[in-house]
Image: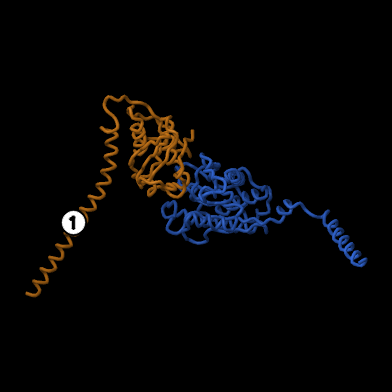
Chain colours: A blue, B orange
Amino acid sequence: MKKLYKITLLIFLISGAAHAVQQPVSVPPDAEDNQHKRYVVVIDAGHGGGEWGVNVNGTYEKDLNLSLAKLVADKLQKAGNNISVLLTRSADTYLKQEERAGLANNKRADLYVSIHCDYAQPRVDGFKIYYFYGENEGPKPAPGELTRWDDVQYKYEGPSEKLAEAMDQYLHAGLIPEDSSDTASGENDIVPLGDRGTMGTYVEPLIGLDMPAVLIEAGNMNNKNNLIALKDIKMQNIIAYHIKEGIVNYLKGK
Amino acid sequence: MEKQVKKSRSSGGLLVLLVIVLVAAAGYYAYTGYYSKEGMIAKTAAKAYELYSSADKQKDIRLFLGDPDKDGFKQYKAKIFDTKAVLNQVKQAVLLLLQAPPAGYVSFMPQGTALRDVYLDPNNICYVDLSGELSKNSNGGSTGEYMTAYSIVDSICTNFQEIKGVKILIDGKEADSIAGHFRIKDVLKPTE
């Protein structure tokens, strides 16, 4: 009986000591999550297949979107081990909005960036970043009811606005990142497009996304200089570099 | 002899083909003519007899058209007839938006868009029913679709303060978006 008592006491002391040794080195759960968190970023190339978007004398928006999206994805992949990047499409294929949103939601993406180019007045110069914002604050489901999939983006109006601002900051011509590690490639250069700012409105290509999301209109295809820049691979690299910087810096601040 | 019969058969075939082509052409013109006539009736009605009487005075309204130099609206002072029925005034305003813009302004209405009708619900939400060209001929991306929608919404809500919001319909039905970029499922409130 004495022997059983000693063994029990020994086990108790050992486990207590082990617990005491563990305590000082343990990291608060939140900080640990942030250190090791892997972020999933979805880059969406707008349009595709038979839906070509804007067409200016045979230059299709869908092709520019895909080229830019691939460059952003590539640069993000190289930006750090803690970022997984997914493209909604990597070829000239058409996807419905439900499919794009479904892919991002199934992968539990941390953020979603949809890349487009638009067609404004010829003298309108530059990029514009949109996030979803509804004036009506969205329907409020009763307790126990699920949110409709196409109303889910209402939840992310605040974080999406922050993401849009982060991207705008890094795309803005006057704000070149100080870290020059990427300059060897010539990518850390001034964005060759004007800044049309950010805007919250009813953005259809962000519907159904269960995460912060933005749509960037990378340039105005009806502006001669913008179109030249959007078609030039060096310029595409510069634009993609700054989009990547905006995403990385947003994730750092999360 | 045999040759002659063949020739006459072949002439008969040509005649049948000609009749088919003529019938098809007549059908096509009747069909397209019907729709363009519908559009014309709406415009003519607005201008001539349906939406106002000669006793109605004119009043100024502000239309939200595009600025050729920047990404935004430029207001244009236009005149409509001050009819008793507000809906008739709204129709006149929308029809003006669908016309070619004055010099120095840009229209955001896709080419060929016609007004089908305008309704008002008990909550003072205005339903503007436009033809399918609104989405078929849209080529503006997010910015263009946004400007199209708010050109209508701001032009209505700014001039007719009793109207609290606008819902855009396409071919008499609710639509998710104009052409894939801007959601019109919701009632839109004025930006001002």
In this view, the residue in front, A164 or A221, is A164
In this view, the residue in front, A184 or B48, is B48
Up the image or down, B113 lies above or below A8; here it is above
Coordinates of residue B182 in the picture (x, y in percent): 46, 46
Left or right of B187: which side holds A184?
A: right
Q: Is residue A166 visible?
A: yes
Coordinates of residue B20 in the picture (x, y in percent): 19, 59
Q: Secondary structure at mark 1?
A: helix
Query: In the current view of this chain or complex, which residue is farthest to the right?
Result: A2
Coordinates of residue B17 in the picture (x, y in percent): 18, 62
Coordinates of residue A248 in the picture (x, y in percent): 64, 51
Up the image or down, A91 lies above or below A205; here it is below
Asked where in the image residue B163 lies, by quadrant, the reply is top left
Q: Chain of mark 1?
A: B
User: Residue at 33% across / 27% down in the picture?
Assistant: B84
Number of marks present in the image shown: 1
**As shown in the figure, which amino acid type bears the numbered disc 1?**
Leu
Up the image or down, B74 lies above or below A140; here it is above
Crowd rating for badge 1 (residues with CA inside 10 Å; few <14, some 14–19, many 20+): few
In this view, the residue in front, A178 or B136, is B136
> What residue is shown with label 1?
B22
Left or right of B41: which side holds A107?
A: right
Left or right of B161: which side holds A157?
A: right
Quadrant housing the N terminus of chain B: bottom left
